[in-house]
Amino acid sequence: MRNRLLIGAMAAVVAACAQPCGSSAAETRLALTPATDTVGIRAYKLGVFPLDGMFHRFDGWLIYDPANRADCHVELHVVVASLTVSSPGMLQRVLGPEFLDAAHYPSLAFHGTCDGNGLNGRLAMHGVTRPFALALDWRHQSVDAVGNLQRSDWGMRALPVLAGPTVRIGVSVNIAGPPHPGP
């Protein structure tokens, strides 16, 4: 009798967790790829002139519940050397040892979860991992995440006046396409 109860309880747990435990049947998982999504930066030279950049090699995923967008998880991995910038003469300097130092820190990563209208997580970049928050803007066909980081918090202190102290990070994810298979 005791074994039957144990087997029955285990069957109930397995049935309840047909979806991964803790996950909703309505969750959507999207792969983050350069084919459909963007990861970019904006800094200001002398605090006035924008320097825009785009990363062209990255991957990751976004899991969210369309009925409750405050419930999401994201993971993003970026190849630093895939950056292009609006001022090509600045690219080697941005990728060099004074700033991103792509030779020593070839990737950056973000892991986070939604919290109301924001995304809170940890950004690993330039050998430093720190909390990082982004604002979210859910649209009909995309979700945009934007955050501002202080370069010095990640050990990038070169040329604070010329390069500006803040870099805006922007990620746009296409949510209109078909969902990708789960994990």
Image (cartoon, helix red, strand yellow):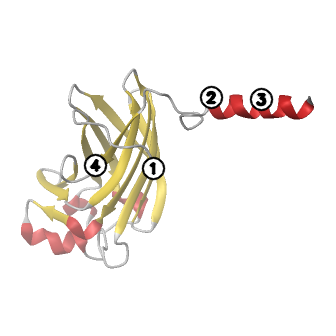
* Gap in angstroms between the C-alphas marked 4 and 3: 51 Å
Identify the mark at residue 111; answer none if there is no mark.
Answer: 1
Q: Which of disc 2 and disc 4 is earlier in sequence? A: 2
Q: Secondary structure at mark 1?
A: strand
Helix, strand or loop at label 2? It is helix
Q: Is residue 45 visible?
A: no
Badge 4 element = strand
Q: Earlier in the sequence, mark 1 or mark 4?
A: 1
The residue identified by callout 4 is 169
Looking at the image, tell me whether mark 4 or mark 3 is earlier in sequence order: 3
Q: Residues within 10 Å of mark 3 (few under 14, many from 20)?
A: few
**Image spot of residue 35 (x, y percent):** 18, 51
Callout 3 amino acid? Gly
Q: Quadrant of residue 9?
A: top right
Label 3 or label 2, whichever comes before in sequence order = 3
Q: CA distance from mark 3 to mark 2?
A: 12 Å
Are circles 3 and 2 on residues that touch, CB within 8 Å?
A: no
Q: Position of residue 21 (x, y in %)?
A: 60, 35
Residue 18 screen position, x and y as percent: 56, 34
What amino acid type should be assigned to the residue bearing mark 4?
Ile
Given contact means CB atoms under 8 Å apart, are the residues at marks 1 and 3 in contact?
no
Q: Amino acid under label 1?
A: His
Camera-near label (4 vs 3) is 3
Q: Which residue is mark 3?
A: 8
Left/right placement of residue 11 relative to residue 18 reads right
Residue at numbered disc 2 = 16
Q: Secondary structure at mark 3?
A: helix
The residues bearing labels 2 and 1 have C-alpha atoms spaced at a distance of 28 Å
